[in-house]
Amino acid sequence: MNGNPLARVRKEPILTITAADLPLCCPLPDEPVALLHPRVYLDPTRTGSAVCPYCSREFRLEAPLPVHR
């Protein structure tokens, strides 16, 4: 790694996630939270994707969407 913890984030503008990644938050649990932005929880289950309001990363759900009633 080049020493900049944001380098990986900037290279991954779209991340594919599965049901195992839910509930989804950004930054992801394995990222250095203190160096990124406040943690926000996102809901990709209604449309199949969600965009972080802080870093603009898009998360796409690779699974059948749950049925909302």
Image (cartoon, rainbow, N blue to C red):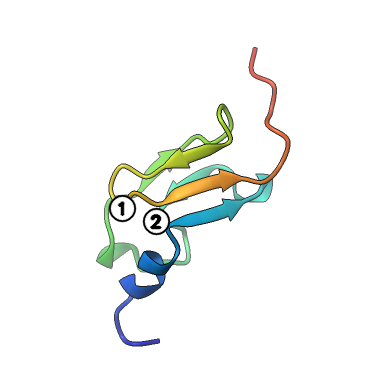
Residue at x 27%, y 55% (from the top left corner): 37
Residue matched to label 1: 55
Q: Is residue 49 left or right of residue 35?
A: right
Residue 62 point in image, percent of width and height: 67, 46
Count neighbours of disc 1 (C-alpha within 10 A) and say few if under 14, some if 14 to 19, many if 20 or more.
Answer: some
Q: Is residue 4 left or right of residue 13?
A: left
**What is the count of numbered marks?**
2
Count neighbours of disc 2 (C-alpha within 10 A) and say few if under 14, some if 14 to 19, many if 20 or more.
Answer: many
Q: Amino acid at mark 2?
A: Pro
Residue 34 point in image, percent of width and height: 27, 65
Q: Is residue 28 above or below residue 43?
A: below
Which image quarter: residue 13?
A: bottom left
Considering every residue shown, the one lying at the far right of the view is 64
Considering every residue shown, the one lying at the far top of the view is 69
Q: Is residue 54 above or below residue 13?
A: above
Q: Is residue 57 above or below residue 7?
A: above
Mark carried by residue 26: none
Residue matched to label 2: 27
Residue at x 45%, y 63% (from the top left corner): 12
Q: Is residue 61 left or right of residue 5?
A: right
Between 12 and 1, the one nearer to me in the picture: 12
Dot placed on the residue nearer the N-terminal end, 2 or 1: 2
Whether tag 2 and tag 1 are in contact, CB under 8 A, the answer is yes
